[in-house]
């Protein structure tokens, strides 16, 4: 896992102006809301090749797409934020004055070039909470619309009348994110029946929360989102503190996450993994 100190701030481009990439939302669409909420909290890094444009004028991002680049763990000295650095513990104060922060670096790639995205890109950094909450909200809405279209598509396919209206609706559904009416039904049913099948959506645990407590031993575990060792993934892990900063790698999250009936459940990454695709774009800005 990559750990850097407070010098991490040198990655950022200092700018007092508002983010010029915040899209002009003329329609209250899910995508516009997503791009707006994400970019409002983001700051360009020193590697951003669109930095000069950012400083000079508004930029039209409609021909760009968002690509997840990296998740990064940063340990900052608390004193950087004006907190008290005095400590009387025997560990020389090292643990108490380090605050753990998690960030996501993403890029604006031109013309859906997320598989390469090596030139003419913008690179930005945002706290992981903002990235996950904004992206998951958008992906959840996409998933609901997808499964609704799938249900209508399946119903139209069973239309014995074979009327023109049903045929037109079927063609419309086929154009929805490459919807396959023959396979999407099972996919959406698996999502709907996730809990019945012994799974829980991993995205429900992106915010630090207590999931286990043994009153006899005093052992407590909190679940929350963290970066993988390579920084290419975001996973749910167990921590020993309510800020989810003390990672416990000796146990697996599935061992201590239970449903309302007290039974262990497995984590499904169906939705969460859409926030960090390997080569695909997270979303188009068009």
Image (spheres, rainbow, N blue to C red):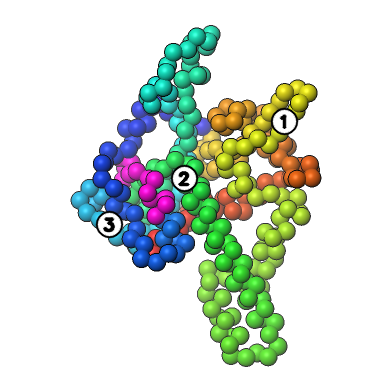
Closer to the N terminus: mark 3 or mark 1?
A: 3
Q: Which mark is residue 130?
A: 2
Callout 1 secondary element: strand
Q: Which residues are magenta?
A: 36-48
Label 1: which residue?
Answer: 213
Q: Nearer the viewer, residue 46 or 56?
A: 56
Asked if the residue under mark 1 is in contact with the one under mark 3, i.e. CB atoms within 8 Å, the reply is no
Q: Residue at x 48, y 36 (%)?
A: 102
Q: Which mark is residue 59?
A: 3
How far apart marks 1 and 2 lie (CA) works out to 28 Å
Relative horizontal placement of residue 173, taking residue 266 as reference (left or right): left
Asked if the residue under mark 2 is in contact with the one under mark 1, i.e. CB atoms within 8 Å, the reply is no
Hey, which quadrant is residue 75 in on the image? top left
How far apart marks 3 and 2 lie (CA) works out to 22 Å
Hey, which quadrant is residue 115 in on the image? bottom left
Quarter of the C terminus within the rendering: bottom left
Residue 220 seen in render: yes
Q: Nearer the viewer, residue 113 or 99?
A: 99
Q: Residue at x 22, y 48 (%)?
A: 55
Give the total number of marks visible in the rendering.
3
Asked if residue 38 lies in the magenta stretch, the reply is yes
Asked if residue 128 lies in the magenta stretch, the reply is no
Callout 2 secondary element: helix
């Amino acid at each position: 896992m990559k750990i850097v100190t407070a010098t991490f701030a040198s990655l950022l481009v200092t700018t007092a102006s508002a983010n010029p990439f915040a899209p002009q939302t003329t329609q209250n669409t899910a995508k516009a809301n997503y791009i707006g909420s994400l970019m409002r909290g983001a700051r360009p890094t020193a590697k951003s090749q669109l930095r000069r444009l950012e400083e000079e004028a508004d930029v039209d991002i409609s021909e760009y797409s968002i690509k997840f680049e990296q998740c990064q763990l940063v340990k900052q000295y608390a004193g950087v934020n004006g907190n008290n650095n005095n400590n009387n513990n025997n560990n020389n104060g090292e643990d108490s004055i380090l605050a753990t922060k998690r960030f996501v670096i993403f890029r604006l790639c031109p013309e859906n070039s997320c598989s390469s995205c090596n030139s003419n890109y913008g690179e930005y950094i945002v706290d992981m909470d903002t990235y996950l909450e904004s992206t998951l909200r958008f992906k959840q809405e996409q998933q609901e619309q997808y499964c609704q279209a799938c249900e209508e598509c399946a119903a139209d396919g069973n239309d014995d009348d074979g009327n023109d209206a049903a045929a037109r609706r079927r063609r419309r559904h086929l154009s929805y994110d490459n919807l396959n009416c023959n396979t999407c039904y099972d996919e959406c049913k698996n999502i709907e029946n996730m809990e019945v099948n012994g799974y829980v959506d991993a995205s429900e645990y992106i915010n630090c929360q207590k999931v286990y407590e043994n009153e006899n031993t005093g052992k407590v575990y909190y679940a929350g989102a963290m970066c993988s060792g390579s920084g290419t993934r975001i996973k749910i892990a167990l921590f020993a503190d309510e800020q989810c900063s003390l990672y416990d790698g000796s146990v697996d999250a599935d061992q201590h996450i239970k449903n309302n009936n007290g039974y262990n459940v497995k984590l499904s990454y169906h939705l969460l993994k859409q926030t960090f695709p390997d080569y695909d774009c997270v979303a188009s800005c068009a």
